[in-house]
Image: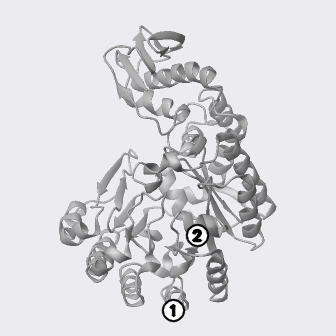
């Protein structure tokens, strides 16, 4: 798809809205309407943004949206509304999240509440101003309400994130900072040494605050060998007051990395919450997406963790994996619900630019939008029947149907770090490859980001530089 843009309209606002209707499509700017293919002409005309849809050089439809105030936000909203207004009737698809293209919809509700809106008024604002459909607006409000006690937690508190980028294999859909052990395992000792150095620095950096949440993610932290895993956990215990932490989580995501020794080490060093993530209960799919473990291994790891004393176990699932439809999703949801879980996160498959799935997209049999909607509806019903309620909500670019990811939890089992990272009310001090430190201003809530190198080899070589970037900074 091509764009011809005239005036002060920002290209990104147009493209992100158009991507909702035409996912995984290439977009490029053009000087004039081409004689072939599809093109959107976007023009600011006084207090309106006008969008015309051209097919093979001829205009087929147009829509004009009023700019309500003289600021960039209003222009952006009018531009998205005009694109929405011309593409919704053309495609026959009305996106459930309306004009919202960002990843944090519940944060909008929290902001509205800060401005004095009631819960009902906030829901109405989502539906009328952002064109969010009723069910999603209700979900957004429910999640924002569930997060209130966590957001208003300890004063002068920070969260700690520690990245371990190694994985046994890299899943086809993955675009995180994950590096397979067969190629990068030789760097494990040096990586953990560098990571411990940065963790020690973060302990000093956070000394004037309360470390409220600690999250060790990746990658797969439990992919470390036992010696390095204990080295890391011991460094965390040395640097922070584990007894005073509200939540200490480790992403033990791959069932094939979980052993009795790893579980014993986590118990020893005070880890209270872990994630064990099958993604699906379909062995054929697991093999196809490169997970490298079986459904039986997931059930064995889950039972082992429960026996070891872990009560707070999150389970990640992905709906819409290549080749799976509503029946497959229902079988997975039924199997997970039978475990009586305390927390489950339901993800919509997102085809990331850096993933292998994006490169193989033409051969992938991805769920259609109607099927995705059906799977999400089924998931919500299974979770409610299992006694879990939504507490955490975010969205990803290029997710199927522009849908959402939802965390469900029993009362008292919400993932506190998940809430803080989405609401951005609390600074996050981060260590490790690909980690991003976010400093939230205490006075104006302005967010400053400090990025670490993604590649573990670069991280090892330049860890001192990344420490220096944070030196003298705080939230």
Q: Position of residue 166 (x, y in %)?
A: 39, 73
Q: Position of residue 174 (x, y in %)?
A: 46, 59
Q: Decide if residue 206 is on the left or right side of residue 57.
A: left
**Quadrant that contains the N terminus:** top left
Question: 10 Å neighbourhood of mark 1: few (<14), some, or many (≥20)?
Answer: few
Which residue lies at the image location 55% right of the left edge and 91% below the top edge?
A: 260
Q: Quick check: 118 above or below 167?
A: above
Q: Does the image show residue 200?
A: yes
**In-front residue for pair 469/37:** 37
Residue lying furthest front: 363
- Of pointers 2 and 1, the one earlier in the residue sequence: 1
Q: Which residue position holds label 2?
A: 277
Determine which quarter of the picture holds residue 455.
Answer: bottom left
Q: Does the image show residue 152?
A: no
Q: Position of residue 388 (x, y in %)?
A: 73, 62
Q: Quick check: 215 above or below 12?
A: below
């Amino acid at each position: 798809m091509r764009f011809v843009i005239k005036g002060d309209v920002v290209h990104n606002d147009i493209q992100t809205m158009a991507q909702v209707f035409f996912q995984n499509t290439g977009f490029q700017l053009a000087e004039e309407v081409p004689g072939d293919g599809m093109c959107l002409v976007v023009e600011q005309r006084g207090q309106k943004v006008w969008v015309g849809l051209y097919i093979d050089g001829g205009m087929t439809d147009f829509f004009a949206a009023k700019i309500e105030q003289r600021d960039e936000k209003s222009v952006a909203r009018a531009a998205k509304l005009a694109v929405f207004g011309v593409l919704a009737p053309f495609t026959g698809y009305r996106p459930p999240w309306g004009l919202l293209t960002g990843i944090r919809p519940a944060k909008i509700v929290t902001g509205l509440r800060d401005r004095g809106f009631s819960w009902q008024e906030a829901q109405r604002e989502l539906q009328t101003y952002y064109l969010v459909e009723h069910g999603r607006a209700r979900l957004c409000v429910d999640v924002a309400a569930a997060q209130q006690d966590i957001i208003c937690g300890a004063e002068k508190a920070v969260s700690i994130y520690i990245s371990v980028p190694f994985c046994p294999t890299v899943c086809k859909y993955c675009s995180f900072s994950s590096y397979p052990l067969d190629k990068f395992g030789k760097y494990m000792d040096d990586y953990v040494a560098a990571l411990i150095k940065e963790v020690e620095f973060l302990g000093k950096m956070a000394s004037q605050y309360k470390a409220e949440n600690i999250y060790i993610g990746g990658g797969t932290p439990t992919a470390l060998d036992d010696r390095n895993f204990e080295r890391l956990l011991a460094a965390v215990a040395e640097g922070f007051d584990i007894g005073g932490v509200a939540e200490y989580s480790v992403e033990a995501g791959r069932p094939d990395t979980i052993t009795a020794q790893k579980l014993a080490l986590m118990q020893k060093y005070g880890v209270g919450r872990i994630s064990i993530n099958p993604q699906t209960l379909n062995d054929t799919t697991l093999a196809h997406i490169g997970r490298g473990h079986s459904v039986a291994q997931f059930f064995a790891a889950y039972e082992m963790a429960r026996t070891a004393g872990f009560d707070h176990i999150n389970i990640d699932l992905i709906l819409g994996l290549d080749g799976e439809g509503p029946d497959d999703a229902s079988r997975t949801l039924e199997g997970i619900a039978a475990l009586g879980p305390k927390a489950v996160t339901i993800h919509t498959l997102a085809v990331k630019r850096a993933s292998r799935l994006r490169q193989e997209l033409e051969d992938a049999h991805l769920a259609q939008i109607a099927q995705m909607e059906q799977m999400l509806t089924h998931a919500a019903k299974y979770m409610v029947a299992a006694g879990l309620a939504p507490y955490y909500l975010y969205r990803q670019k290029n997710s199927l149907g522009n849908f959402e990811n939802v965390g469900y939890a029993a009362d008292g089992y919400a993932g506190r770090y998940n809430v803080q990272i989405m609401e951005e009310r609390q600074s996050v001090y981060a260590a490790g490859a690909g980690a991003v430190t976010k400093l939230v201003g205490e006075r104006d809530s302005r967010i400053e980001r400090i990025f670490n190198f993604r590649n573990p080899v670069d991280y090892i070589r330049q860890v001192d530089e990344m420490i220096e970037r944070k030196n003298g900074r705080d939230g």
